[in-house]
Image (cartoon, helix red, strand yellow):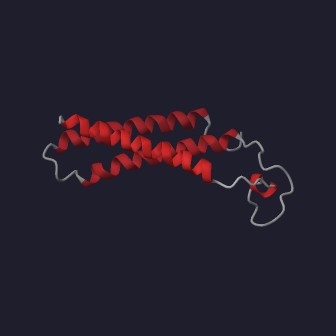
Amino acid sequence: MPSWIAVVILMAVAFLFAVGSLIGTMALKPRRKFDAKVEAYESGMVPLHDSRGRYNVRFYLVAVTFLIFDVELLFFYPWALYFNMISDQVSLFASGCVFLAILAVAFVYEWRKGALDWNQ
């Protein structure tokens, strides 16, 4: 038996398990509907108005900015850990500086566009 057939069989079993799990949960789930299920949780208090209000776009800008600069830390952490273990430290340091410069340019661009100014 060729080695790729085992991989195909494993993928087919995984796919059938996933589809079977979805079909099983849809077939076995309770079908009772009640009003409390569609309401937003308000810590046990009766909601006063609809919870699906509009939010200011600034909150989304801050969230995306946080994600961008937080993912940057995910790239720098292993870079800092393995810096002393790699023999070509000059090119590693240069690549880290280029990455940091790109992030600095992005930060300055965002600052100039006013995404960090809450008074607008």
Can you see residue 117? no
| Residue at 57% in and 51% down | 25
| Residue at 74% in and 65% down | 43
Q: Position of residue 46 (x, y in %)?
A: 84, 62
| Residue at 23% in and 52% down | 82
Left or right? Give the position of 24 relative to 34. Answer: left
Q: Position of residue 86 (x, y in %)?
A: 16, 48
| Residue at 57% in and 34% down | 112
Residue found farthest to the right: 48
Q: From the viewer's side, name the closer residue of 32 and 51.
A: 32
Image quadrant for the N terminus? top left
Q: From the viewer's side, name the closer residue of 1 and 35.
A: 1
113 w.r.t. 68: above or below: above
Occupied quadrant, residue 117: top right
Left or right? Give the position of 81 relative to 49. Answer: left
Left or right? Give the position of 40 relative to 21. Answer: right
Q: Position of residue 107 (x, y in %)?
A: 49, 39
Q: Position of residue 27 (x, y in %)?
A: 61, 49
